[in-house]
Amino acid sequence: MDNILEITNLSKSYGEFSLKNINLSLKRGYIMGFIGPNGAGKSTTIKLIMNLVKKDEGQIRIFGLDHEKDEIAVKEKIGFVYDENHFYDELTVRELKNMIRPFYSRWDEGLFQKLAKDFNLPLKKQIKHLSKGMKMKFSLALALSHGAELLIMDEPTSGLDPLIRNELLEILQEVIQDEDKSIFFSTHITSDLDKVADFITLIHNGEILLSTTKDELLEQYCIVKGGKETLSETNREDLIGLKENKYGFEALCRNKREAMKRFGNSVILEKPTLEDILLFTTRGGRTNVSSY
Amino acid sequence: MFHLIKKDVLMQKRTLLLSLLIMVFFSFSLSPMGTAGLTVSIWAICYLFVYGAGMLEEKTNGDKLLVSLPIRKNTIVMSKYVSVYVFAAYALLVNFIIRMLANLFQIPHFSFPFTLEAVASTLIAVTLIFSLSFPLIFKVGFMKSRLTNFVVLFAFLFVGHPIAGQLSNGAGIDFSLARSDTGLTILVVLALLIIVIASFSLSLAFYRRREF
C-alpha cells in the first residue's frame, strides 16, 4: 500500500518551542488521529504539511510529491478544515464558494450543491452569521467538492456540540468508504478517535511519542493498579506515567502480557482508553513507548 | 486573479456607498487644489478599498485560507497590485461622472480638472505610493504597516509633490505629459515600470518568506 502522507525527520524551531525529528506516514484509505495536549505541536505539524510555515529540516511528501516543489499539484488534492474560521465574514456562503471554486480544476459543483443541501447550508447567509458547526460543515463541503484525496483537519471538533461532532464523525466514516481517501485528524478530544481512527499518533513537547494502529494500542497497552508493596525498582522501569499515593499506584504499561507476567494477580489490569494513554504518556515522560 | 479582486470588492459592498460620499465631499472641498485634489481623491478611494480588504482579511487571518488553496503566491501578490488600478478606475469613473453632472448643472468649483495630464499624473502618484507601501504590507501585514505607510504618503504629498513642482518649474525639466513629448513619456513609463517590478519582486519575496 502506498503512503499518501510521509513525513521524514521534520524539524521546526520557534524560540522556546521546537518540533523535533517528526516521522510519520499515513496510508491510503485510513484515518490517522493526531493527538496530544495543547501546545504539543499538532497545529505546527499541520501548518508545516500545508506549507503555511517553513520547515527547518526534513521532508514532507504528499501523494509521493514534495509539498514545496509541487505545492499547487499537492494542494489541488488536499481538503482542509481548520480549528478557527478563516473565511471572510462579509461574504455569503455562495460568494465564498464561487471565489474558491475556480482554483480547483476538479471542482464538482453538483456534489457541492448536494452537500450544501444535505448539510442545510444557507447559501445566501453571510459567513459571520453562521454557527461554528455550520462553518465546519461548509469547510467540509468545500473540501469534499474538489475531489480531495487527503483531508487535513486541525481540531475540527473543538467547540462543537456533541450532536454536530457525531454528525461530522459519521461524514468522515462515509468519506473513508472510498478507499482512495485518507484523513489526518488532529484533536485533543480523544473520544472522537475511538469512533473513527485507524491509526493513532501521539505528540508531546514537539516529539512523536507513539504512532501505531488504534487496535494495537488498545489491545497491547493496559492500566496497572496495585499496592505500593508490588512496586520494585525493576518493574518501575516498565511503567509509564507512574502515579503513587499512600495507598498504592497506577500507571500505564505498554505490554499487557508482560505486565501479567511481572505482576501476576497482585495488581488489577484495566483496558485503557485513548484518553488514558494520552494522559499517562504525556504525564510520565517518553520511556518504553512504541514507535510505528 | 480576477476572483481574488472580485472577493476584495464583494467584501466591501457597504464601503461602496461611503466611497461615493467621500468622492462627492472631496470634489467640493478639494477642487481648488486642481490635479493634486484629484490625486488625493483617487488615492483616498484606493486606500479605502485596498486597506479595507486587507484589514478584513487580517481580521480572520484570511491569508491562511488563501495560502492553503492551490493558488500561487505571485497571483495573490499580483492581485493586490492590480486591484489598485481597478479601484483607481472606479474612482476616476465616479469623479468623471461628478464632473459631467457639475458641468450639466453648472455648479462652479465642484469638480476636478479632467485632462489626460491630470489622469496620468494621478495614476503615476497612485502607482508610486502603493509601490512604496506594498512591500511593507506583504512583510508585516496591513495593520502593522498602516502607520509607516501613512508617513510615506504624507512625505510623498507634502514633500514629493512640491519638489516635483519645483523641478518642473525651475530645473528645466518638463514633466508635462500634455506635450506630445514621446521620449519623456517613454522615460516616465519605463521608470514607473522599473519601480513597480522592483516593488512587486520585494513584496513577493517577503510574502514567500512569511509564515501563517
Image (tube, coloured by chain):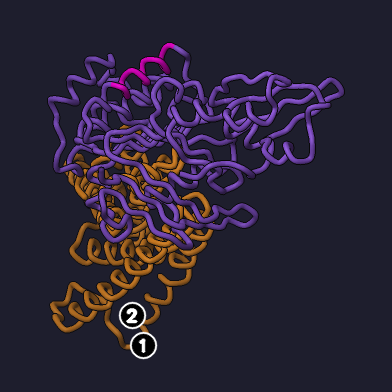
Chain colours: A purple, B orange
Tell whether position A166 is magenta: yes
- Residue A263 vs residue A141, the one in the foreground: A263
Which residue is denoted by mark 1 in the rendering? B171
Asked whether the residues under the numbered discs 2 and 1 touch, taking CB atoms below 8 Å apart as contact, a structural biologist would say yes
Q: Quadrant of residue A130?
A: top left
Tell me whether marks 2 and 1 sit on the same chain.
yes
- Residue B57 vs residue A151, the one in the foreground: A151
SS of the residue under disc 1: loop
Where is residue B178? Give x, y as percent. Answer: 18, 72
SS of the residue under disc 2: helix
Does residue B141 appear in the picture of this structure?
yes
Residues drawn in magenta: A163-173
Magenta stretch, main secondary structure, is helix
Q: Quadrant of residue A197?
A: top left
- Specify whether B110 is left or right of A103: right
Rendered view: A253 above or below B141: above
**Is the residue marked by circle 2 packed among few (<14), some (14-19), or many (20+) residues within 10 Å?**
some
- Specify whether B160 is left or right of A223: left
- Specify whether A222 is left or right of B87: right
